[in-house]
Image (cartoon, rainbow, N blue to C red):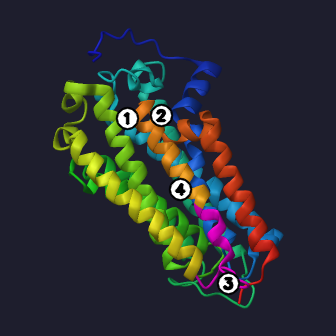
Amino acid sequence: MAHTADIDVVHARGGAAMIELLRAMRPKEWIKNTFVFAAIAFSQQRLWAQADAVITVSAAFVLFCMVASAIYLLNDLVDMEKDRAHPKKRNRPLASGRLHPRVALVAAIALALTAIPLAVLLDRNYTPPGGSVAWLGHDYDFPVTLLVYALVQGVAYSFYFKHVVIMDIFTIAAGFVLRAVAGAMVIDIDITPWLLICMGLLALFLGLAKRRAELVLLENGAASHRRILDEYSLPLLDQMMSIVTAATIIAYTLFTSTAETLPHEPFPVMMVTVPFVIYAIFRYLYLIYKQDGGGSPADLVLKDVPLASCIVLWGITAVTILAAFPRT
């Protein structure tokens, strides 16, 4: 394990500082925010074929990227000293000293304070076909969800839940579910409970994989970097992952065969995508156990060709089915 080293703090300036700020915002992690497109992809009204709905959800994706980056900056500010004891995180802009903490703090505040008002405008300017079905009252449901996401992930998790065993993983999973819910709220449509269950289970799987990767990477010094890691063990995480893996596959299979928003004639056609999901999960497990991956889902998706190809093929197949077969 790498130990904390003396760091010569040389803050970047000008354009170099902006590059370091962009790195600290973790743009590759924005891929997680694609969960906001889940509701429109499986919408019964086929809203994915309507330009205004697609533009609205795309704008919601951008707003989530802004808030997520603000949260990443906040997390790195809070964990800056601990990250310097981590063999990989010590190279992050804040932990390495290349990015001045004041720049990161101002950027985080600016991103958050810009995203929330824009969310209100976005929600007010979209009119769904057939009228609104908003839960919290039109003009407020999407920004409220975005605000809850920011508070849960940026405040509750950063300052409390990341230190509570098991709840830390559930909080991470909640972020993915909130993305999916927000994607439905911004275009005022219902979202099937099965889809939320699938996403929640998948998010738990990714959270457990992340914790396992940290334990493997840090070995006996895990607790010195993050105290909560001392509450876990590899056998415990492996057992949890086995349960969640099985539950995810079962839940997705039930979703494809029972969800009212999916085609069921001449048979539950979406079930042909189940093999893609099983392969993707198995491939992810392979990368975790044989390649010591799992610390960053975005890294695996962007760098592992078989996994990325499987996800793309799943998406193409799902869209083709939704376009070719009517709902009944």
Secondary structure under tag 1 reads: helix
Percent coordinates x, y for residue 301 in the rendering:
58, 41
Q: Which residue is mark 2?
A: 104
* In this rendering, the label closer to the viewer, 2 or 3: 3
**Is residue 261 a member of the stretch shown in magenta?**
yes
How far apart are the two marked residues, 2 and 3, measured between alpha carbons? Answer: 50 Å
Residue 12: tell me if it is visible.
yes
Identify the residue shown where x is 46% and y is 39%: 286
Residue 66: tell me if it is visible.
no
Residue contact between numbered discs 4 and 1, judged by CB atoms under 8 Å: no
The amino acid type of the residue labelled 4 equals Ile
Q: Which residue is mark 4?
A: 278
- Viewer-proximal residue, 328 or 82? 328
Percent coordinates x, y for residue 249 in the rendering:
47, 63
**Which tag, 1 or 3, sits closer to the chain's start?**
1
Identify the residue shown where x is 34% and y is 52%: 241
Secondary structure under tag 3 reads: loop
The amino acid type of the residue labelled 3 equals His
Identify the residue shown where x is 49% and y is 78%: 193
How far apart are the two marked residues, 4 and 1, measured between alpha carbons? Answer: 38 Å
- Asked if residue 138 is positioned above or below residue 221 in the image, the reply reads below
Q: Which mark is residue 264?
A: 3
Secondary structure under tag 4 reads: helix
- Asked if residue 94 is positioned above or below residue 258 in the image, the reply reads above
Q: Which residue is mark 1?
A: 77
The amino acid type of the residue labelled 1 equals Leu
**Which tag, 2 or 3, sits closer to the chain's start?**
2
Residue contact between numbered discs 1 and 2, judged by CB atoms under 8 Å: yes
- Viewer-proximal residue, 254 or 96? 254
**Which tag, 2 or 4, sits closer to the chain's start?**
2
